[in-house]
Image (cartoon, rainbow, N blue to C red):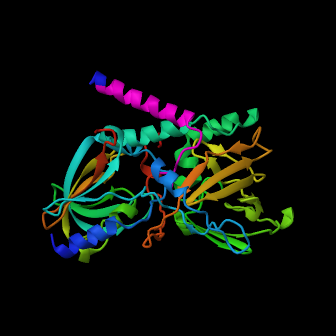
Amino acid sequence: MRTKALAAGISVVALALAYWTVPVRLVAQGIGGDTAAAQAAGKVPTPHTGDGHPDLTGLWNGGGNGNVNVVIDEKGNVHIPLNSRETSPVNFERDSGIRQRADSNRPIYKRQFWSKVEYLDENGNAEDPTFSCMPAGVPRMGPPQKIIQLPNELIFLYQTKNTYRLIPINGKHPPADELEGTWNGDSVAYWEGDTMVIDSIGFNDFGWLGWPGYFHSEDLHVIERLRRVGNVLNYQATAEDTTVLMKPWLLNPRTLLLNTDPKGTLLEELPCAERSLQHMTTKERG
Amino acid sequence: MSQRFRRALMALVFISAALPVLAHHAVQAQFDFDKPIQLKGTLAKIEWVNPHSYFYFDVTDSKGEVKRWAFESTGPGGLRKAGLSRAARGGFKVGDTYSIHGFASRDGTTSGFVTAFGFPDGRLVTIWFGDPNAN
């Protein structure tokens, strides 16, 4: 038993080290990835639109990750396995929490906000907006799963909460006093060489930047960069918030694979309803 | 199991669409994984919602009193992909009687976390954890 526990501990440490030492993690839909598939996908020619820019259009949930494995035996019994160390639901949640808190890439807050971050993290079950079915918003919700690139507009589709963003290319933000303050902000896009840059302002102060209590103010300014190489899409997001952060925070970059399956699609996501908070007896979360 | 059910299931399994990542609570904050329970009840309602599907059963206790139990499971995506949301495909049917295997809630309410459903036709649907490092 002690050996098993030690092995489990080593696994966690190894996982944490991998997290810290790999600068760009391959994440298809945030659930893992296949490096060989990404290398192969990056070697095909990058398609371009008539105006000479890379064409970002496509369904970017390829790589085969995130599919539910269903095992059916000859008697018709169905087994839907969920992955967790030592088949433990406790480890599933606890390891997730450790991974997110141990990530050395974190926003650096001004001293007067350290206690607020700590409070929000400790009380995340009640405080994290996504726990109560609110949106993750930009940039926390990450890259879109589908992009439609028109000459003057980008259309971003996200499976999570069936979300969309309409982003004018070479558009301009409205005057600051006309901005409403929303979860996704007001976004405009422009080309910087072969990189599509999206500039967003006009956020509310309800959204978080990340799971460990990383809140932001209404002064959040997000810059997303998307670059297509073959059938690989590299996505980066930087969060600037001069009110609460010491310096801009570059979130962990994401690498997405084009889904080339003609049957590939986005499924309608069902509504969210929070049922658990009233029954929880501890503050642990994952 | 009918061939139709099997074909429907396998077709669903291979749909190339990824699941979203959801923030969620720690299930151990709500359920006691040292307290396994097994009940038999009539399926009264299903909520196919995120982040957790909910199954409501009417369970008759030892005194003959019927109580409504709420069982939490995983998100609805995987269960729907497995065809379990459609009675015609071998999925759940409100009004049928199931055996429910799971763990009790910590707060003592008539609720729990389900690990497996025993269907009226004898099939067992298990939704439980596998160890990615086991091999």
Quick check: A91 above or below A208? above
Give B23 or B60, whichever is nearer the viewer. Answer: B23
Left or right, A169 with reference to A20 = right
Image coordinates for residue B42, horizontal then vertical, percent:
22, 66
Residue A25 lies in the magenta stretch = yes
Instruction: Identify the residue at horizontal 42%, vertical 58% (top origin).
Output: A64
Residue B81 location, x and y as percent?
Answer: 34, 66
Specify start and end residues of the magenta stretch as a single range: A4-31
Identify whether A31 is placed above or below A53. above
Which residue sits furthest top? A2
Judge by depth and name the residue closer to the eye, A64 or B72: A64
In the image, A198: left or right of A38?
A: right
In this image, A247 relative to B97: left or right?
right
Q: Main secondary structure of the magenta part?
A: helix
Estimate the x, y position of residue A124 in percent, counting from the top left.
55, 44
Front one among A242 and A154: A154
Q: Does residue A217 appear left or right of residue B93 in this picture? A: right
Going 56% across and 52% down the picture, which residue do you hit?
A255
| Viewer-closest of B16 and A174 | B16
Q: Is residue A53 magenta?
A: no
